[in-house]
Amino acid sequence: MTWLTGKTVVITGAASGIGEALAHALATQGVRLLLADVDAARLEAVAASARLRGATCLTQLCDVSQAPAVDALAERALRELGGADVLINNAGVALVAPVQSLSLDDAHWLMAINFWGVVHGCRAFTPQLQARPGGVIVNLSSVFAMVSLPTQSIYNASKAAVRAFSDALREELREKPDVQRDTQHAHGVRVLCVHPGGIRTRLVAQARLGDISSIAESPQALHAQFQSVARTTADQAAAAIVQAVCSRRTRLLIGTDARLGDWLFRLAPGRASAWFSALALWGQHQVKRSMARRR
């Protein structure tokens, strides 16, 4: 982990979930942190905890769906910390609704954060990352970039878009020693795309919900189902991401469910979503039966 010592790391969506866990994990690695989120109170609490762990830590309110806000975040990183070495585009939201009845406003809201937030971050920070050797961009995708579930269409689409965008960006920013450089000498930037499975965070509890009658009796039941099947903690996910950054990986699957979904997609791309959905439905039934026995 010594590679991180003295580096500047920017994390979006840092007030909870994987972002919060990353802030805690990185605070002990001798890094300087710039944490961004829209939740001011929780963001300051995370920053206070990081400082207690010995990290230099700045915070900034930032709605990643707004390009000017992300540009301002990048400007602050350059002005006060000398520029970012690692950018972690972690901010994300969820929407659960069937395609035919979902709100288009909700769909645009999700895409603006989950996909365009990643685009805004990469565009704003790439110049300063290229100016420092060893720059890394970490984009949070999902196992749902490979397999899709009903009522998750827009979330699935956003994460598939992040995967495709990351693959193209990686090639654009790859070190090309055989190409004549300009006078400013741009270094290569590594792009790591992360595909978590179910992670125990507040993502589902905070999701916007449409008609969920086909999968749960109530929002509370939906959240309980998710918590029962999500096997990976945010701390475990953060540790895996930090290790992947330090080991110079470009792709990371987190959790048994992510590895299973990826394997199914490789085995039979045309049928993987149907198989994964069937497994998810079976799991939901098991959770419902378990909850009914407890009553």
Image (tube, grey):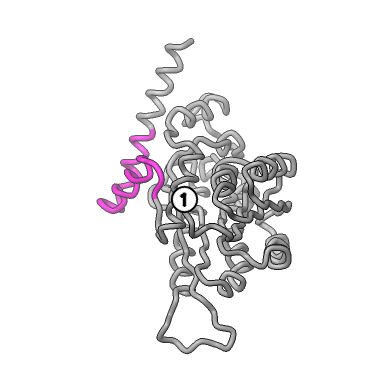
Asked if 269 appears above or below 134 in the picture, the reply is above
Q: Is residue 273 magenta?
A: yes
The residue tagged 1 is 241
Note whether residue 102 is visible: no
Q: Position of residue 257 (x, y in %)?
A: 37, 40
Residue at x 55% of width, y 57% of height: 5
Residue at x 40% of width, y 86% of height: 178
Residue closer to the observer: 183 or 150? 183
In the displayed orientation, state which residue is furthest to the left. 267
Q: Position of residue 131 (x, y in %)?
A: 58, 75
* Kind of residue indicated by mark 1: Ile
Start-end of magenta stretch: 253-280
Q: Position of residue 210 (x, y in %)?
A: 58, 37
Q: Residues within 10 Å of mark 1 (few under 14, many from 20)?
A: many
Asked if 207 appears above or below 86 in the picture, the reply is above
Residue at x 70% of width, y 39% of height: 45
Q: How many marks?
A: 1
Q: Main secondary structure of the magenta part?
A: helix
In the rendered view, does 7 fall on the left or right side of 142?
right
Asked if 271 appears above or below 70 in the picture, the reply is above
Residue at x 69% of width, y 67% of height: 78
Residue closer to the observer: 188 or 142? 188
Note whether residue 59 is visible: yes
Residue closer to the observer: 22 or 276? 22
Q: Is residue 114 magenta?
A: no
**What SS does tag 1 mark?**
helix
Q: Position of residue 76 (x, y in %)?
A: 72, 63
